[in-house]
Amino acid sequence: MTIYACSSNPGKLREFSLAGRESSISDLDIRPLPGLAHISPPDENGSTFEQNAAAKAVYYSRYSDELVLADDSGLVVPALGDAPGIYSSRYAGPDATSADNNALLLRNLSGIENRSAYFVCVVALASFGQVLTTCRGTVEGQILHEAAGTHGFGYDPLFFYPPLNVTFAALEDRQKFAVSHRGAALRNLFLWLGRSHQRLRRNHQSPVH
């Protein structure tokens, strides 16, 4: 079974690929959507991670005759009114880099004692313009006062994970996947696929629209 992941983020694509290899579904292959770089991205105007993930999956499913996977994920900091939330990738502006977003997060947390935070990931699976399922994963941690670690992406250098006593950026891909929000969401998806993939094989025969 091939599932096309709809993301241009190399860190996410590595995690999607790893997820497919480590799934208990023996023939599952998660790879980037062919031609993604030439497809204009959809608007992300939902008010929740679920809405945005579903909208992206539906949009990109029209460009493939295989199952399509999209995710929406972000960092939630209660002390900042749950910001950056669904705006995590563009927290410091539409063209912000990860460094820009991290710098703004640290500025906004300056002088705030409560630095608890959690990551959220919602993955959506779609086919021929219809959402088949959405699955959510979360992981709790703390925001450090300065970056630590050289792996990962996004807010990983600032996100301290107490059970392992390191930031996500200090973990190798497999270590992070075992505990991360994206790993949890994908494992929930694999449970659903394990119950449904034979039916999907039978039903997924229509030509692309």
Image (cartoon, rainbow, N blue to C red):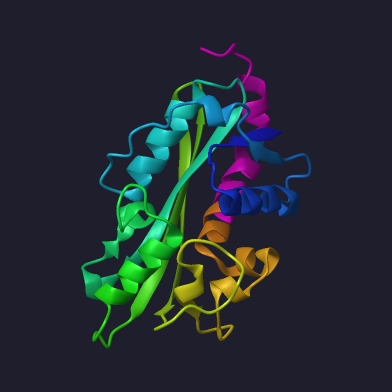
Residue at image location 63% in from the left, 73% down from the top: 171
The secondary structure that most of the magenta stretch takes on is helix
Residue 191 seen in the figure: no
Residue 160 lies, in percent from the top left, at 48, 79
Q: Nearer the viewer, residue 134 or 99?
A: 99
Q: For residue 26, which quarter of the picture? A: top right
Q: Quadrant of residue 22?
A: bottom right
Depicted 167 relative to depicted 67: above or below:
below
Q: Residue at x 61, y 41 (%)?
A: 193
Residue 178 or residue 42, whichever sits in front = 42
Residue 111 image position (x, y, % from top left) = 24, 86
Q: Which residues are magenta?
A: 187-209
Whether residue 168 can be seen here: yes
Q: Is residue 197 above or below residue 121?
A: above
Q: Is residue 96 magenta?
A: no
Residue displayed at 56% across by 48% down: 189
* For residue 120, side relative to residue 112 (left or right): right
Q: Quadrant of residue 3?
A: top right
Q: With 79 as the anchor, is 30 left or right in this view?
A: right
Whole-percent x and y of residue 28? 72, 40
